[in-house]
Image (cartoon, helix red, strand yellow):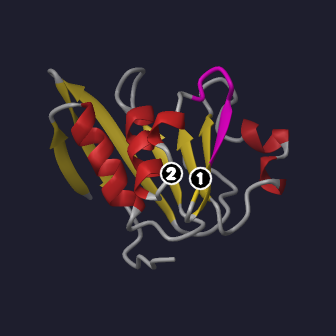
Amino acid sequence: MKTRVLSDDYATEKLGEELAKLTPKGGTWLLRGELGAGKTTWARGFVAGLGGNADDVASPTYAVLHRYETPRGKVFHLDLYRLGETGAWSLGLEEQVTSGDFLLVEWAGSKGPWPTEWVAALSLETQGEGRQALWTMPDVCQRS
């Protein structure tokens, strides 16, 4: 497990950019943290790290799902807060997400099905003006 103190939103986005560059196509990130902990802020950085437009990234809380195009592939940004761990799959998401797409899942448990076996987890906890990030990711990182 890796950990980092993030002083502000900029640092949170930079961590998202950094981890996006280590995520292979088909990679899934399970994002955990209370409301306002920085999950969507981190996702902005992730999309930017793939060459996409960070300004397009918005919280999927009400829409449930957002899709972003990047030079490295599509990013599906999903919120399971109201749907529960497996609720998104009842929407037919497994028919849309391919093994070459990236998946960011807010309020994720551990169940899938995820598009590939490369599944990482990030937890964000508010700490004063900043936040603490804790993450695990598979040992083998392939660039695509």
Determine which of the numbered discs, if any, sits on residue 103 in the image: 1
Give the mark, 1 or 2, whose residue is nearer the N terminus: 2
Q: Nearer the viewer, residue 22 or 3?
A: 22
Work out how far the residue at label 1 is from the one at label 2, CA to CA, in angstroms: 14 Å
On the picture, is 132 further left or further right than 41? left
Relative image position of residue 91 (x, y in whole percent): 83, 39
Residue 84 percent coordinates (x, y): 66, 32
**Residue at x 59% of width, y 52% of height:** 103
Q: Few, some or many C-alpha atoms within 10 Å of disc 1 (few <14, some 14-19, many ≥20)?
A: many
- The structure residue drawn at horizontal position 65% and vertical position 37%, both measured from the top left corner, is 66
The quadrant in which residue 78 appears is top right
SS assignment at label 2: loop
The vertical placement of 5 against 62, above or below, is below
Within-10-Å neighbours for mark 2: few <14, some 14–19, many 20+ = many
Q: Amino acid at mark 2?
A: Gly
What residue is drawn where x is 41% and y is 76%? 141
Where is residue 7, by image quadrant? top left
Q: Is residue 27 left or right of residue 100?
A: left
**Label annotation for residue 52:** 2
Q: Nearer the viewer, mark 1 or mark 2?
A: 2
- Whether 22 is drawn above or below 14: the answer is below
Please report the bounds of the magenta region as a residue range: 60-68
Task: Decide if residue 109 is on the left or right side of residue 35.
Answer: right
User: Residue at image x 65%, y 68%?
Assistant: 100
x and y percent of residue 96 in the render?
A: 80, 53
Residue 35 x, y percent position in the rendering: 42, 21
Res 107 visible: no
- Residue 61 inside the magenta-drawn segment: yes
